[in-house]
């Protein structure tokens, strides 16, 4: 599995020939957009910084797009979405937490979540999470302290902070790493297999935006 970060909350996850796009930035956003072909696009909230599914229709790939809670199965990928809340952009938004199972790993994408109070259904599903994508920028999403507290409670093996840098409050990444007591070397691409997660307990990986 190869994971790259395009800024804000946009990720490209590739395993074999299948590509998943998380919260691609739309053309209407003030942030930079990335164009790539995806088989599946998961949009957590209806905001121009997060809902650019059209950016993932490229070449011969026309993605299946999920924009809310439910259960989905696409190309052998199992997805569950759970409703939560966000105030990104200032207004109350429905936010979807997505759990994806692939390559014997469970990936949890928190989207623009702004509270650590989750639904009973989401809490029950958040067991045995291998990789957690969590927003840390504040201003309508979790702040660094709350994000790390949630990550610790979930007991994920690997934590990937997002929603930092050009978006969110200044120095949010620095504050999050201080909370975690870690200082990992940033990388522009994370290549990982299930066996690479053995022995990890809440380790942090920092991805540098590729655009």
Image (cartoon, rainbow, N blue to C red):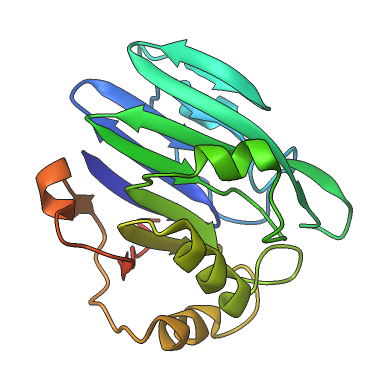
Comparing 155 with 2, the one in front is 155
Screen quadrant of the N terminus = top left
Q: Is residue 103 above or below residue 169?
A: above
Q: Quick check: can you spot residue 51?
A: no
Q: Is residue 116 left or right of residue 174?
A: right
Residue 76: image location, x then y, percent: 32, 12
Which residue is painted at 75% across and 37% down in the image? 46
Which residue is painted at 60% across and 30% down in the image? 81
Which residue is painted at 18% across and 53% down in the image? 197
Which residue is painted at 22% across and 53% down in the image? 190
Residue 168: image location, x then y, percent: 64, 71
Q: Is residue 104 above or below residue 90?
A: above
Residue 103: image location, x then y, percent: 22, 29
Q: Is residue 12 left or right of residue 48?
A: left
Q: Quick check: can you spot residue 90?
A: yes
Screen quadrant of the C terminus = bottom left
């Amino acid at each position: 599995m190869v994971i790259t970060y395009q800024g804000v909350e946009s990720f490209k996850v590739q395993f074999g020939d299948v590509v998943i796009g998380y919260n691609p930035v739309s053309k209407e956003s003030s942030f930079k957009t990335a164009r790539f072909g995806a088989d599946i696009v998961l949009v957590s909230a209806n905001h121009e910084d997060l809902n650019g599914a059209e950016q993932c229709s490229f070449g011969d790939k026309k993605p299946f797009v999920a924009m809310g809670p439910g259960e989905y199965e696409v190309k052998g990928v199992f997805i569950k979405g759970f409703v939560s809340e966000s105030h990104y952009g200032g207004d109350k938004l429905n936010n979807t937490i997505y759990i994806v199972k692939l390559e014997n790993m469970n990936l949890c994408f928190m989207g623009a979540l702004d509270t650590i109070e989750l639904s009973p259904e989401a809490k029950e599903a958040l067991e045995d999470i291998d990789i957690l994508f969590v927003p840390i920028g504040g201003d309508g999403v979790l702040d660094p302290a709350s994000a790390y507290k949630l990550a610790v409670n979930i007991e994920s093996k690997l934590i990937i902070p997002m929603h930092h840098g050009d978006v969110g409050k200044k120095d949010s990444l620095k504050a999050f790493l201080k909370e975690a007591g870690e200082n990992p070397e940033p990388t522009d691409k994370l290549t990982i297999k299930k066996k690479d997660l053995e022995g990890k307990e809440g380790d942090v990986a920092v991805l540098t935006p590729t655009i």
